[in-house]
Amino acid sequence: MYANRLIETKLQKLFKYFPVVCLQGARQVCKSTLIETVFRGNLQTVTFDPVQDISGARKEKDILQIQV
């Protein structure tokens, strides 16, 4: 079950003024769930997880480049 957070309104305001916003925090505290819930899939997101990044970079050299 999703719990509403105080930061939701602040995130929405930030995205009105800035094209890129970094949301960081400890592992598994629902950062991705927060973004998906607040913006309902209307954003392009990038997750920087060292395990996934290293594994992906070894398989595909351009994994961290984003096509806009």
Image (spheres, rainbow, N blue to C red):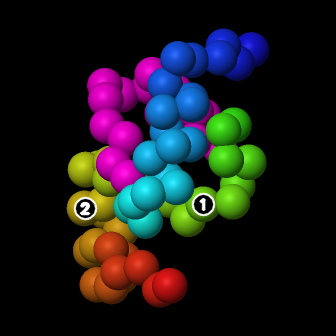
Q: Which residue does the numbered mark 2 point to in the structure image?
A: 54
Q: Which residue does the numbered mark 1 point to in the structure image?
A: 43
Q: Residue at x 69, y 60 (%)?
A: 42
Amino acid type of the residue that numbered disc 1 sits on in the rendered structure? Leu
- Tell me if residue 58 is in the magenta stretch: no
Q: Residue at x 25, y 62 (%)?
A: 54
Q: Which mark is residue 30?
A: none
The answer to whether residue 46 is seen in the rendering is no
In whole angstroms, how far apart are the C-alphas of marks 1 and 2?
Answer: 24 Å
Front-lying residue, 49 or 25: 25
Mark 2 element type: helix
Q: Residue at x 67, y 47 (%)?
A: 39
Which of pointers 1 and 2 indicates the residue nearer the eye?
1
| Bounds of the magenta segment | 21-36
On the picture, is 63 further left or further right than 31?
A: left
Front-lying residue, 28 or 58: 28
Amino acid type of the residue that numbered disc 2 sits on in the rendered structure? Ile
The quarter holding residue 36 reads top right
